Image (cartoon, rainbow, N blue to C red):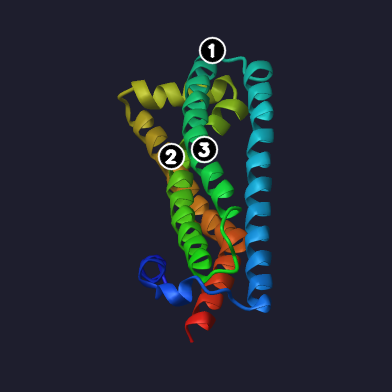
Amino acid sequence: MNIDDLKDAWKNDDRAFTHSPISVAMQGKTTSAVTRIRKNMKSEFIGTLCSYPIFIWFLFFRQTDPFLFNITSLLFFSMAILNAYYFFKFYVFYRSISNYDVSMKSSITKVAYELELNTEIYKAHSFCITPIAIMIAIGLLCGKQTSAYILQGLTDSSHSATSHLLIMFGILLISFIGAFIFINLHIRLKYGKYLKELKAIICDLEA
């Protein structure tokens, strides 16, 4: 059952069955899954907020190179804007699932549909943030030698500069591959198993 199946099930449920209460056992399973989802969402949001003071401390107290400071500041601002937009949507979803009546099949289907939709949005957001986060990390952790290396790769036309650019692109490519693996594993552990539980409940109710 994928996201399209969930959407169709949500829209096409028989109304007489949709609004009839489900068993207490099913309600308990659904409530447990939704509670765990909300708890994981809350911890992830708090973890993201706690990372910002660390970034800011590194930026203003550890970064001494003017070029890297300026570039890192711009990247950090861009990342903050993207995260603010995403977490606003994240918060709307967090609040909405607390208002659904988990004793109704239509509500369970809607929660499962919105959870799967938001995990896809989460993946897209993470892939957008990854290159920015990598460059911020380089800017925060590296010094003047790295600044000179980057400048040479961007401004010099020699063969050495080309190799510098290839190395930087290689680092980004490896980072994207690592991010792809990590993001999918993270979603599977944090939300995937609870999404499977909700889908299993929906399948049991349709049986």
Residue found at the very far left of the displayed protein: 157
Sequence order check, earlier mark of 1 and 3: 1
Residue named by callout 1: 66
User: If you read the primary sequence from the N terminus, does the residue marked by circle 3 or circle 2 appear first?
Assistant: 3
Q: Give the residue furthest to the bottom.
A: 207
Horizontal relation, residue 38 to residue 180: left or right: right
Q: Which mark is residue 88?
A: 3
Residue 78 x/y as whole percent: 46, 27
Residue under pointer 2: 167
Helix, strand or loop at mark 3: helix
Cα–Cα span, label 1 and label 3: 33 Å
The three-letter code of the residue at mark 3 reads Phe
Residue 29 lies, in percent from the top left, at 66, 72
Measured in 3D between alpha carbons, the distance from the residue under mark 2 to the one under mark 1, in whole angstroms, is: 23 Å
Q: Secondary structure at mark 2?
A: helix
At label 1, which amino acid type do we have? Pro
66 versus 51 height, above or below: above
Q: Residue at x 56, y 70 (%)?
A: 198
> Closer to the camera, 9 or 45?
9
- Above or below for 175 versus 168: below
Separation (CA) of disc 3 from disc 2: 36 Å
